Image (cartoon, helix red, strand yellow):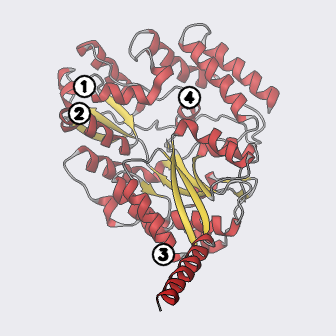
């Protein structure tokens, strides 16, 4: 009897091992969500495995700076994840490098998402990813610094022009910086578009951003930089430095996605308590707010494309997008149904609640302004280098834009 029982146990163990071995192993990658959102990602893993008992799902979080290289290496090695979280600008480059699979979505599946976010991931008529979360920029401002500068905390700037005037007044009256504009990298491309100025002609084959109006916009920031109204490391460290300065109580206004107000809360509770939130000051001519979009893509070479697409759709469905927003407290869904939830209209006295409520009112103006053009990596470097040269006084604003447009049109 003992022998028979032992045999039964061994057989059961072997069968259990075989069943486990037969499970399909899947991975999905996200960008910089650990450790803050570990619980939510683990919930998604458990739920997908419950709905798909033959699948064993693994979540991998990757730093933003390493994502593109890591993904390209995994595709080259023939071992890509089933679904990968990418920003819109990363997606452009990876589509051009042939690293992503086109998705096969039904009309009903497409209708789950707002048209604008879905179009962001559509290239040459092919849907290359499904949209996930986004968050329009807001302005977090320090009420104590406003008072010291003689500004009314109850009346924050409503346009770009009044924001710049307020920033100058803060620096003149307090010695602290008023703001740190998002102009590093290729961000000036978004600044131009928010000002209602085109980047490419209607055919998309010619760069046109060296007009007198474009020069005037760039010159505004060159003058601010030259006269010491914005920090020296604006072009090098951008948003990271702005968040650090604001959290240290040394910056009057922080232009940010509302999710980053949480970082201020974690870094310096005293500054967080002095913080109020206002809508991002629009440029009336553009009436649009560049809002970077995150999505899920299926990499080239996945073993089961249908299952990978199923995973991407699961991660971005109505239920899961709404739950993710409730966990982050400050990001917004790209699905139509989830966006109507009453959660997004709940206000509150603290800056995080204010940020969510303010950003929710801006969604109608939100648009990812990332453009698709060939040789994006090369052309973006030309743009970045010349804008930096203008800011440093090595070229005039006009010469810098002329040089970029000439280089771009030679490639376009």
**Mark 1 or mark 2, which has the lower sequence index?**
1
Count of labels in the image: 4
Say which mark, if any, is on residue 188: 4
Q: Report helix, strand or loop for mark 1.
A: loop
* Residue matched to label 3: 50
Give the camera-side residue of 400 and 282. Answer: 400
Query: Is residue 128 found left or right of 111 in the rendered image?
Result: right
**251, above or below 330, in the image:** above
Q: Nearer the viewer, mark 1 or mark 2?
A: 2
In which image quadrant can residue 197 be found?
Answer: top right
- Measure the C-alpha gap from mark 4 to mark 3: 46 Å
* Mark number displayed over residue 268: 2
**Helix, strand, or loop for circle 2?**
loop
Q: In front: mark 3 or mark 1? A: 3
Secondary structure under tag 4 reads: helix
- Above or below: residue 124 compared with residue 139: below
Tag 1 near tag 4, CB within 8 Å = no
């Amino acid at each position: 009897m003992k022998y028979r029982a032992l045999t039964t146990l061994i057989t059961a163990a072997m069968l259990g091992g075989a069943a486990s071995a037969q499970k399909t192993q899947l991975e999905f990658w996200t960008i910089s969500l650990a450790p803050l959102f570990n619980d939510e990602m683990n919930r998604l893993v458990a739920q997908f495995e419950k709905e798909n008992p033959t699948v064993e799902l693994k979540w991998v979080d990757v730093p933003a700076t390493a994502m593109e290289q890591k993904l390209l290496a995994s595709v080259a090695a023939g071992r890509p994840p089933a679904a990968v979280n990418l920003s819109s600008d990363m997606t452009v480059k990876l589509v051009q490098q042939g690293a992503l699979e086109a998705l096969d979505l039904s009309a009903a599946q497409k209708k789950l998402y707002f048209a604008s976010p879905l179009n962001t991931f559509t290239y040459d008529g092919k849907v290359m990813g499904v949209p996930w979360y986004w968050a329009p920029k807001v302005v977090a401002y320090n009420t104590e610094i406003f008072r010291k500068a003689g500004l009314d905390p109850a009346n924050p700037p409503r346009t770009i022009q009044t924001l710049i005037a307020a920033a100058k007044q803060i620096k003149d009256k307090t010695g602290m910086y008023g703001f740190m504009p998002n102009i590093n990298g290729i961000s000036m491309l978004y600044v131009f578009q928010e000002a209602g100025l085109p980047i490419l002609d209607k055919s998309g084959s010619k760069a046109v951003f060296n007009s007198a109006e474009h020069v005037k916009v760039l010159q505004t920031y060159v003058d601010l930089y030259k006269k010491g109204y914005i920090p020296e490391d604006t072009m090098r460290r951008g948003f990271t430095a702005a968040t650090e300065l604001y959290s240290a109580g040394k910056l009057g206004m922080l232009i940010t996605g509302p999710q980053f107000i949480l970082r201020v809360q974690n870094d310096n509770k005293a500054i967080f308590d002095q913080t109020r939130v206002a809508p991002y000051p629009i440029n009336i001519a553009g009436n649009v707010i560049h809002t970077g979009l995150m999505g899920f893509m299926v990499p080239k070479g996945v073993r089961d494309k249908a299952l990978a697409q199923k995973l991407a759709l699961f991660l971005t469905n109505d239920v899961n997008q709404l739950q993710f927003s409730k966990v982050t407290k400050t990001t917004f869904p790209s699905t139509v149904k989830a966006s109507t939830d009453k959660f997004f209209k709940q206000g509150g006295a603290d800056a995080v609640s204010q940020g969510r409520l303010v950003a929710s009112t801006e969604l109608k103006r939100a648009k990812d302004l990332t453009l698709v053009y060939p040789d994006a990596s090369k052309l973006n470097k030309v743009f970045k280098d010349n804008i930096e040269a203008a800011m440093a006084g090595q070229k005039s604003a006009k010469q810098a834009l002329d040089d970029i447009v000439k280089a771009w049109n030679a490639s376009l």
